[in-house]
Amino acid sequence: MADLFIIGQYEGVAGTTAVAVGSQVMHMLTVMIVGLAMGTTVSIARAIGADDRPQAAAATGNTVTLFLSLSLVLTVGLLLLRRPITAVMSTPEAAVEGTVRYLTICFPGIPCITAYNILSAIFRGMGDSKSPMFFIFIACLANIALDYLFIGALHLGPAGAALGTSLSQAISVAISLAVIVRRRTMPLAKADLRPQKPVMDAILKIGVPISVQDGFIQISFIAITVIANRRLMDYIRANHLQPDGFSREITLIDYGLTNDTEKFVTEITIPVREA
C-alpha cells in the first residue's frame, strides 16, 4: 500500500500500474511463505510446551535449512520467469517494462522475505508475538522513508519502489537476528541444521495445506483481476476510449465469516476519455 500511495504522487499511470501488478505477485508469494511457516510455529510451540529444548532446536534448524533452500530455488526460478509472469498478468503494454524492473529487484529479495517470516514464526512458536509486530513496524517505517528517497528524491519509479520494499525487509531481518543473538533465544548446533525426516515431515504436514489454501485464494484474486482487466480494456478499445487517470480496485472479502465465493465482491474502476 505504501508503494502504491507514494508512487502515485510522483509517477504516471504506467508506473503506478507496474507497481500494482508487481506487488500483487509479491503479495501472493509472501502469503504462501507465511502459510508454510505456520508449520514451524506449531512444531516449535509443541516442543516448548513439552519442555523439549532439543526438539525445538531441531525444528528451528530444519526450518532454516528448508526455507533457505526454498528461497534460493524460488529466486532463481522466478527471475527466469519474470517476463512470462508479467504477460500472464495481462499487464498493459506501457507498464510492462516497469513491472519487469520491479520484479527483477523484488525477486532477489525473496530470501529476506523468507528469513523475516521464519524468524517471526520462531518467535511466535516460543510464545512471543510482540517482537514480530515490532520488526514489521520498523520495516514499514523504513519502507515509507526509502520509497520517498528512491521514488521522490531520486525518481527511480517502480525500481525505486522495489528497492524500498527489498531493503526494508532486509532491515527487519537484521534487527530480528540482532535480537536473537542478544537474547540467546535459540542456540543451535550444526546437527540441528541437518535435515531430519520426522522434523521436516511435521513442519510440512501443517504448513503445506495452509500455504496451498492461501495460494489458491491469491490466485483467484489474480485471475479475477486479469479477467476484469481484459474485459474492461476490450470495452475501452471497442468504444474508442483510452484510460485517463488511476484505476481503483475495491475488494470486499471476509473469509472470517464465509468461504462462499458468491459473497465476494471485487470492483475495478478505470477513468477513461475519448481517444
Image (cartoon, helix red, strand yellow):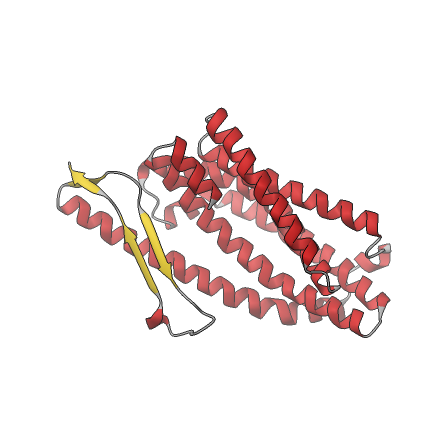
Residue 106 pos. (x, y %): 54, 41
Q: Quadrant of the C terminus?
A: top left
Residue 181 pos. (x, y %): 82, 48
Residue 34 pos. (x, y %): 59, 59
Residue at coordinates 49% horizontally, 41% vertically from top-left?
Answer: 103
Q: On screen, 90 above or below 256?
A: above
Residue at coordinates 51% horizontally, 68% vertically from top-left?
Answer: 213
Q: On screen, 107 above or below 221?
A: above
Question: Is any part of residue 9 visible from this angle?
Answer: yes
Residue 10 left/right relative to 27: left
How many tags in the picture?
0
Question: Is any part of residue 166 visible from this angle?
Answer: no
Residue at coordinates 48% horizontally, 46% vertically from top-left?
Answer: 81
Residue 132 pos. (x, y %): 66, 54
The residue nearer to you, when weighing 140 against 101, is: 140
- In this view, the residue farthest toward the top is 154
